[in-house]
Image (cartoon, helix red, strand yellow):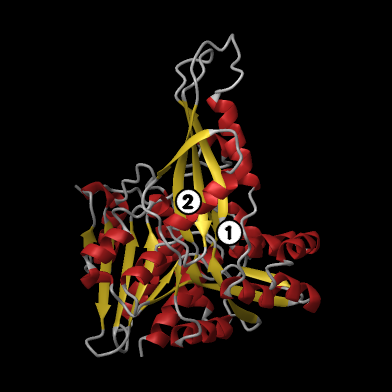
């Protein structure tokens, strides 16, 4: 059954010029992308539970209105995605425009506007998903429709996909697609969320393209203790106290620093002082050098530090106590771990044991889903050259820099399933940069500037035209 979405009321969307593009085209694309994003935000796909099929159905209708036919795919039925292919009928490369339909939950009382209103006001589209990442569901759709309306790609094929469950593991989303429907999504190139936030430092305007990402291992530490009435404090065996020791030990653990290409590239790009740069590239001096860098520029230090190896983040603590006056026999500490490419489940377990060595606690470890190793795509490549040339054409002072994501995106599944695929994370902004954009992601009052939204559509349209030729 199709789920209808009310169209947002027409509101004035300010027109902004983009260098090298007809202002009338910019205005048209601003209106179309903003309207579509507003509609998508108003479909609440908070994950859990997701219910992303409603977005897939909406996109099926949206493309049909423009004479294009796609396919709703995925399992289970209520958590499907949407895939559409525009084929040139001529030999050539293929490009997938990828984005996910689900969003993280939002606590409405904390917001200035209702998080699922899709309000268009004050040069912004507001709401959960405006930056992560329904903006790309909309921008990629408009770009795909524009390429098709112009006669399609000159060669090869352009593929559009919006997928489910990225925020919680991609079980029925991208991971399902690459294993069950590779005929739909196996392409030469993938462009996805994650990069494109510019950073202005030392008179430079740096745009970060993400060519890879760290791996993810999520687990629970089960801390065991004794039960009894809380009126008689336990000398030993209080699972809550033991869990507190575990949390403190993990949070303060300093894993051995690993300097590899991902951190070296970023240090070379962001650190001007030669002596400090050399110290950051030496594992023996990098920790002290990071502290010095943080005193100079904490934001740059925060970008570099996670690329040195393991990062353990305790995020959830739960006990099985039935009442406030009863000691629990079990406390669960959920931990999100990120590690460099090449590290596996056994190495994570070894590092946890090292971190908790000597901690007074009786604990076991349970994995939350599979451990996903990090991976990367070759850089530079013809793909990155087209991206850089397109960016320079419309942002003349832009410099393209490569980095690895410290988070996780669906690009990982495509690199792992299709070793011949080059997957980059890049969705550039032109008005607001890293300092403004990144604090809003997964936060209250999430919003995107309408010119940034239009630029993302126009940029990827031109990348497709340049690559598929």
Q: Which residue is mark 1?
A: 123
Q: Nearer the viewer, residue 311 or 362?
A: 362
Mark 1 burial class by Cα count in 10 Å: few <14, some 14-19, many 20+: some
Question: Residue at the front extreme?
Answer: 358
Q: How many marks?
A: 2
Residue 349 is labelled as 2
Is residue 30 toward the left or the right of residue 58 in the image? right
Q: Can the viewer see residue 445 in this picture?
A: no
Q: Is residue 365 above or below residue 234?
A: below
Q: Position of residue 161 (x, y in %)?
A: 32, 66
**x then y, percent, for residue 355:** 59, 47
Task: Give the crowd class for mark 2: few <14, some 14-19, many >=20 residues within 10 Å.
Answer: some
Q: Nearer the viewer, mark 2 or mark 1?
A: 2
What secondary structure is found at the residue carrying circle 1? loop
At 59% from the left and 22% from the top, the residue drawn is 236
- Tell me which residue sits at (60%, 77%) in the image: 401
Q: Is residue 153 above or below residue 409?
A: below
Q: Quadrant of residue 111?
A: top right
Give percent across and percent down for residue 19: 58, 81
Report whether 150 appears left or right of 27: left
Point out residue 359 in the picture as x, y percentages from the top left corner.
Answer: 60, 38
> How far is mark 2 from mark 1, CA to CA?
48 Å
Q: Are marks 2 and 1 in contact (CB under 8 Å)?
A: no
Q: Is residue 183 visible?
A: yes
Q: Residue furthest left?
A: 1
Instruction: Name which residue lies at 68% across and 68% down.
Output: 283
- The circle drawn on residue 62 is none
Left or right: 278 in relation to 43: right
Q: Mark 2 or mark 1: name the one nearer the start of the chain.
A: 1
Secondary structure under tag 2 reads helix
Screen quadrant of the C terminus: bottom left
Residue drawn at the location 48% of the way across and 76% of the way down: 459
């Amino acid at each position: 059954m199709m789920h209808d979405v009310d169209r947002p009321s027409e509101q004035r969307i300010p027109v902004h010029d983009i260098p090298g593009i007809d202002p009338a085209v910019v205005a048209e694309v601003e209106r179309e992308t903003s309207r579509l994003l507003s509609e998508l935000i108003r479909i609440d796909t908070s994950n859990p539970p997701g219910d992303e099929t409603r977005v897939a159905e909406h996109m099926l209708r949206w493309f049909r209105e423009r004479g294009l036919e796609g396919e709703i795919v995925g399992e289970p039925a209520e958590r499907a995605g949407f895939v559409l292919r525009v084929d040139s009928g001529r030999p050539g490369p293929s490009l997938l425009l990828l984005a996910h339909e689900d969003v993280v939950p939002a606590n409405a009382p904390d917001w200035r506007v209702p998080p699922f209103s899709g309000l268009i006001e004050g040069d912004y589209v507001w709401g959960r998903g405006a930056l992560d990442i329904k903006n790309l569901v909309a921008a990629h759709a408009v770009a795909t429709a524009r390429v098709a309306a112009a006669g399609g790609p000159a060669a090869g094929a352009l593929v559009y996909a919006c997928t489910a469950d990225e925020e919680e593991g991609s079980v029925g989303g991208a991971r399902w697609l690459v294993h069950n429907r590779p005929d739909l999504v196996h392409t030469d190139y993938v462009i996805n969320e994650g990069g494109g936030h510019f950073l202005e430092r030392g008179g430079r305007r740096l745009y970060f393209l993400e060519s890879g990402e760290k791996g993810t291992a999520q687990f629970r530490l089960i801390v065991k203790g004794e039960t009894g009435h809380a009126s008689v404090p336990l000398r030993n065996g209080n699972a809550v106290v033991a869990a507190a020791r575990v949390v403190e030990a993990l949070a303060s653990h300093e894993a051995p620093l690993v300097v590899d290409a991902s951190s070296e590239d970023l240090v070379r790009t962001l650190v001007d002082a030669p002596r400090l740069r050399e110290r950051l590239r030496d594992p023996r001096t990098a920790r002290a050098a990071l502290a010095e860098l943080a005193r100079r520029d904490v934001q740059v230090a925060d970008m570099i530090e996670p690329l040195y190896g393991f990062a353990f983040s305790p995020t959830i603590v739960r006990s099985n106590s039935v009442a406030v006056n009863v000691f629990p026999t079990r406390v669960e500490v959920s931990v999100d771990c990120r590690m460099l490419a090449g590290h596996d489940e056994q190495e994570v377990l070894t590092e946890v044991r090292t971190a908790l060595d000597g901690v007074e606690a009786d604990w076991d470890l349970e994995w939350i889903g599979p451990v996903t190793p990090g991976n990367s795509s070759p850089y530079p490549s013809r793909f990155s050259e087209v991206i850089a040339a397109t960016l320079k054409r419309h942002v003349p002072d832009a410099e393209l820099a490569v980095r690895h994501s410290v988070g996780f995106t669906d690009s990982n599944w495509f690199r792992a399933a299709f070793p011949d695929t080059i997957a980059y994370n890049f969705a550039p902004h032109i008005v607001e940069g890293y300092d403004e954009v990144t604090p809003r992601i997964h936060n209250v009052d999430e919003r995107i500037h309408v010119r940034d939204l239009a630029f993302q559509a126009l940029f990827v349209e031109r990348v497709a035209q340049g690559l598929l030729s």
